[in-house]
């Protein structure tokens, strides 16, 4: 689908203006959005706008790294948004030049739609131009990282508190899934942070230089998101180590109990083994109360060993 917004010299926002009318004198600047385009719609990148083949190739390939490339008359940006439910990366390609901005994305973009509707419904057109659209688009993409990070952080706290009384195996499974989500976030946020840093230090982007304070604020947000991601990864490391330590302690405790039980039964097994040899010249076998005496001795021995281990604190 192709949709257009044009800002006229009469300070009006005109939606869905045909492509062949975008270059009329009454159009001050325009925004063309290609959302989930088919092959015919994709072809206008070359036929109508004559963008560089390498930039068009980057649009068609899946998930290019966030970057910017300079071409004659325009700059090409690759942004990465995140799907809030699946955490899948969603690429937004932006062609930005004097008097126009063209966006290309293969999926519905919540962030881009928010900026589109805001411009479409604005009452103060003078505050808007192609540089402001670029700023708003970056700002929305970065701002939508925060709810995802906070949701993951809340889930980490739930894992740590274990309010649902889940088994350790299920908790560890959730913990490793969370670490995978944090890794996906880091692989998205860090390249975006590097992109903003490059934009802020570029000598070719006059619009960014004029709004350096605003783009610096976006960069600061990315730094904050990066710190939250690293902090949450450290928290998952601590929780994982705690669970591993607890699991090791419980295993050692179980082995200790089993060792005590085995130790108590060792002398009893020895006595039973001695009197189970069936030699004919064993005088104890002819004792009238020999069986009961052996049972009493074995019981007393087991009780004494139990008390001795308990006194040593092995059952604490």
Image (cartoon, rainbow, N blue to C red):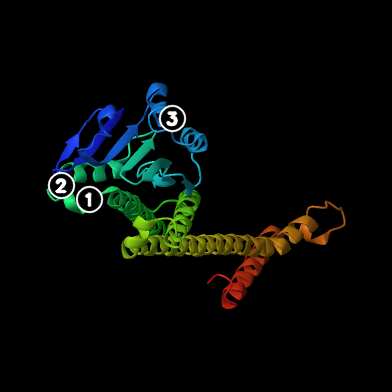
Task: Pick whichever, 154 or 71, lies toward us.
Answer: 71
Q: Which residue is mark 2?
A: 122
Q: Which residue is mark 3?
A: 46
Mark 1 to mark 3 CA distance (whole Å):
27 Å
Circle 3: is it few (<14), some (14-19), or many (20+) Cα within 10 Å? few
| Dot 2 and dot 1 residues touching (CB under 8 Å) | yes
Circle 1: is it few (<14), some (14-19), or many (20+) Cα within 10 Å? some
At x 46%, y 36%, the residue is: 59
Q: Residue furthest top?
A: 40
- Observer able to see residue 163: no
Determine whether 294 is above or below 37 in the image.
below
Q: Is residue 85 left or right of residue 243?
A: left
Task: Pick whichever, 299 or 265, lies toward us.
Answer: 265
Q: Residue furthest front?
A: 25
Image coordinates of residue 213 in percent, x first then y, are 32, 65
Image coordinates of residue 8 in percent, x first then y, are 18, 41
Mark 2 to mark 3 CA distance (whole Å):
31 Å
Q: Which residue is mark 1?
A: 128
Q: Quadrant of residue 104?
A: top left
At x 20%, y 46%, the residue is: 118
Q: Secondary structure at mark 3?
A: helix
- Observer able to see residue 101: yes
Image coordinates of residue 121 in percent, x first then y, are 15, 43
Q: Quadrant of the N terminus?
A: top left
Determine whether 253 is above or below 90 in the image.
below
Task: Pick whichever, 298 or 97, lies toward us.
Answer: 97
Task: Pick whichever, 89 or 67, lies toward us.
Answer: 67
């Amino acid at each position: 689908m192709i949709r257009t917004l044009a800002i006229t010299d009469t300070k009006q926002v005109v939606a869905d203006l045909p492509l062949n009318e975008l270059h009329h004198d009454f159009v001050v600047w325009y925004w063309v959005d290609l959302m989930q385009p088919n092959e015919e719609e994709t072809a206008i990148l070359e036929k109508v706008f004559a963008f560089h083949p390498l930039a068009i190739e980057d649009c068609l390939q899946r998930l290019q790294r966030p970057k910017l490339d300079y071409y004659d008359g325009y700059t090409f940006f690759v942004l990465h948004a995140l799907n809030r439910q699946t955490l899948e990366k969603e690429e937004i390609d932006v062609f930005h030049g004097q008097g126009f901005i063209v966006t290309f994305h293969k999926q519905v973009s919540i962030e881009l739609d928010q900026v589109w509707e805001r411009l479409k419904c604005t009452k103060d057109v003078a505050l808007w131009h192609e540089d402001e659209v670029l700023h708003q688009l970056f700002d929305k993409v970065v701002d939508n990282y925060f709810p995802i990070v906070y949701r993951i952080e809340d889930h980490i706290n739930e894992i740590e508190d274990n309010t649902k009384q889940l088994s350790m195996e299920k908790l560890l499974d959730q913990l490793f899934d969370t670490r995978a989500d944090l890794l996906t976030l880091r692989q998205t946020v860090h390249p975006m942070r590097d992109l903003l840093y490059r934009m802020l230090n570029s000598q070719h982007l006059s619009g960014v230089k004029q709004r350096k304070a605003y783009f610096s604020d976006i960069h600061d947000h990315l730094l904050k998101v990066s710190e939250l991601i690293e902090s949450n990864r450290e928290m998952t490391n601590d929780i994982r180590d705690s669970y591993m330590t607890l699991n090791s302690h419980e295993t050692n405790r179980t082995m200790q109990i089993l060792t005590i039980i085995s130790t108590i039964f060792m002398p009893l097994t020895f006595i039973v083994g001695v009197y189970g040899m069936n030699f004919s010249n064993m005088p104890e076998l002819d004792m009238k109360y020999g069986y009961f005496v052996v049972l009493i001795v074995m019981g007393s021995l087991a009780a004494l060993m139990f008390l001795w281990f308990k006194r040593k604190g092995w059952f604490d």
